[in-house]
Amino acid sequence: MSRKDFGGRVVGDGADDRSATILHVDMDAFFVEVELLERPELRGRPLVVGGVGGRGVVSSASYEARAFGVRSAMPIGRALQLCPHLEMLPGSMHKYRAASHEVMRIFRDITPLVEPLSIDEAFLDVSGATRLFGTPREIARLIRRRVLERTGLPCSVGAAATKFVAKLASGKSKPNGLLVVPEDETVGFLHALPISAIWGVGEATEQRLRGRGIHTVFDLAHTPVDSLERAVGKANAARLSALAWGRDPRRVETERIEKSVSHEQTFDVDVTSHAELEREVRAQADAVGARLRKAGLAAGTVALKLRWASFQTITRQTRLPRSTNTGLTLFRAASGLLDEAHSDGQAVRLLGVRADHLSEDGEGMALTLWDEHHDDEWDAAERTIDRATSRFGKDALRPASLLGRRERRDGRDGLSERPNRPSQGIDGEAG
């Protein structure tokens, strides 16, 4: 089950599914299932993929592990406390990307209207595919069968008239299930769910709503909007009320602009040296810049994330004078944030760099006269590095300040089944 509380598992086909042309397909425990293709003897055991060190985190947990309370993003140490006989695998991102590529190709064989949400889930609009492949229910069954036959991986599918309800339906049918919610059954389906199932209702909002006696989606739907406004604000009140009645006008988007690109590292041992943290910031800024350039994007804001040894986490951000995807420029901004937030000797457990307010590369990048941060020459150098690393590997070229830096990886550094959310991103509980 995902982090969202959808209540108990339900599978079903619905009575008349012709209106349920939006599918949400979610791979089940994706990283774990990919590993089980090579390690079938581990099937049925509590298993996680992620950082294998005591300070790593869980990237994906089998359903057997979840029965013990193990969840993604949980520290490995805590997972072992909950399930001492837990099996742990380090994971391999290239295998997951290859499997994801094959899964998405299967989706696009059915319909060109595919909106990938992350490496292991996507929305599909199958309204134009019904003449070839049958009803939405039959298409959902076909997808599940093809994915299993071609990849050996299970998935869950929700079919509905809107994206919001389709995603709820797939979560409700997990694992390895199918749930169709026809349009005329949408309100009844929604109103039986707990308030936490609504998109955008996190712990704080849930507590505020429960404090007003709103425990279910039915309660939410029948609460006057002006009363909701006093609890969650005007914009959120209108959105939550609309979702409670199944209103979601969003279409499946085949092309999307990512809203953030991030890179973060949990250290094997707490780092106190400001100089060492600055080296890590440089490495992460370069990695974020490379990913921005690959995606054809530029960032308008840089954020720095620090988690102290006490597990308290802080985030600081700054707006750039102009949008950029140059690692050196990102580093300068993030390094300034580090100088403000950290003093030499403070113990840091995790550090991350994130680029926000993204735009197409070239938009918002016009230089002002005598721009002191004009990094065109360095930008050209980084693009040369991109070409070299693409051909010879990531260590072919790098700044001298990073020579000898040991790459450290855990479950939250390039090994996540979900992107940064709630917004679309390049980087959740796994399905």
Image: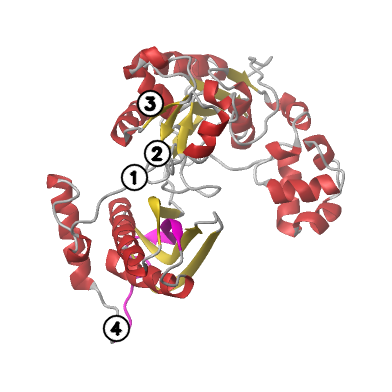
Residue type at mark 2? Gly
1 or 4: tag closer to the N-terminus = 4
Kindly identify the residue that appears in the image at 71 percent across and 53 percent down.
236
Q: Mark 1 near mark 3, Cβ–Cβ under 8 Å? A: no
Report, in whole angstroms, how far the alpha carbon at label 1 lies from the one at label 3.
Answer: 26 Å
Q: Secondary structure at mark 4?
A: loop
Q: Say which mark, if any, is on residue 35.
A: none
The residue identified by callout 4 is 372
Task: Classify mark 3: residues with Cα within 10 Å, few (<14), some (14-19) or many (20+).
Answer: many
Q: Secondary structure at mark 1?
A: loop
Q: Position of residue 305 (x, y in %)?
A: 47, 60
Is residue 265 visible in the rendered image? The answer is: no
Q: Say which mark, if any, is on residue 103.
A: 3
Q: Secondary structure at mark 3?
A: helix
Residue type at mark 3? Val
Q: Which label sits in the foreground, 3 or 2? A: 2
Q: Say which mark, if any, is on residue 51.
A: 2
1 or 3: tag closer to the N-terminus = 3
Report, in whole angstroms, how far the alpha carbon at label 2 lies from the one at label 1.
Answer: 7 Å
